Amino acid sequence: LLDHATGLVVGETTLIGNNVSILHNVTLGGTSKASGDRHLKIGDGVLIGPGTCILGNIKIGDGAKIGACSVVLKEVPPRTTIVGNPARVVGGKDNPIKLDKMPSFTMDHTSWSDYVI
């Protein structure tokens, strides 16, 4: 889901998984002018809040939630919530999530990433 899709910048080698929701004014970019694989990899079921900037050849884990206006420069573990500039983990669980509870499906921006099966 590309909500509004205005102001969206996607680097040329960025990989985006299935069932990912990306809100407006998001940058998915690299950190150098080098050629080759220099952009991020986004796992399945990720929710990226508006105004977020994710830079570098890093991985965003499955089911992660990234809060609005966050600046992400390091890898994001699966099923965690990160916020801030620079982004930091503020919640998460090690348990796998049900498909209907994926952040990208529920568009839930307020709850922690602590899904119970």
Image (cartoon, rainbow, N blue to C red):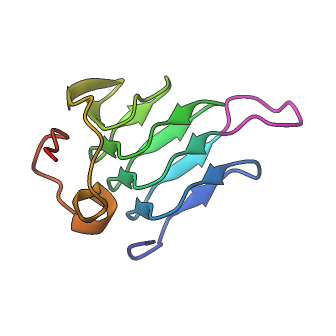
The residue positioned farthest toward the bottom in the image shown: 4
Q: Quadrant of residue 114?
A: top left
Q: Quadrant of residue 100?
A: bottom left
The residue at the point 57 percent across, 47 percent down is 28
The residue at the point 10 percent across, 51 percent down is 110
* Image location of residue 42, percent across then percent down: 54, 46
Image check: 12 left or right of 110?
A: right
* Residue nearest the viewer, comparing 102 with 11: 102
* Residue nearest the viewer, comparing 7 with 75: 75
The residue at the point 63 percent across, 56 percent down is 10
Q: How many marks?
A: 0
* Image location of residue 15, percent across then percent down: 66, 51
* Image location of residue 117, percent across then percent down: 16, 47
Q: Is residue 106 placed above or below 103 in the rendered structure?
A: below
* Residue nearest the viewer, comparing 52 with 94: 94
The residue positioned farthest toward the front in the image shown: 117
Where does the magenta region start and end? 30-39
Q: Is residue 23 placed above or below 94 in the rendered structure?
A: below
Is 65 within the magenta? no
* Image location of residue 64, percent across then percent down: 35, 42
Q: Which quadrant does the N terminus fall into?
A: bottom left
Instruction: Name the chief secondary structure element in magenta.
Output: loop
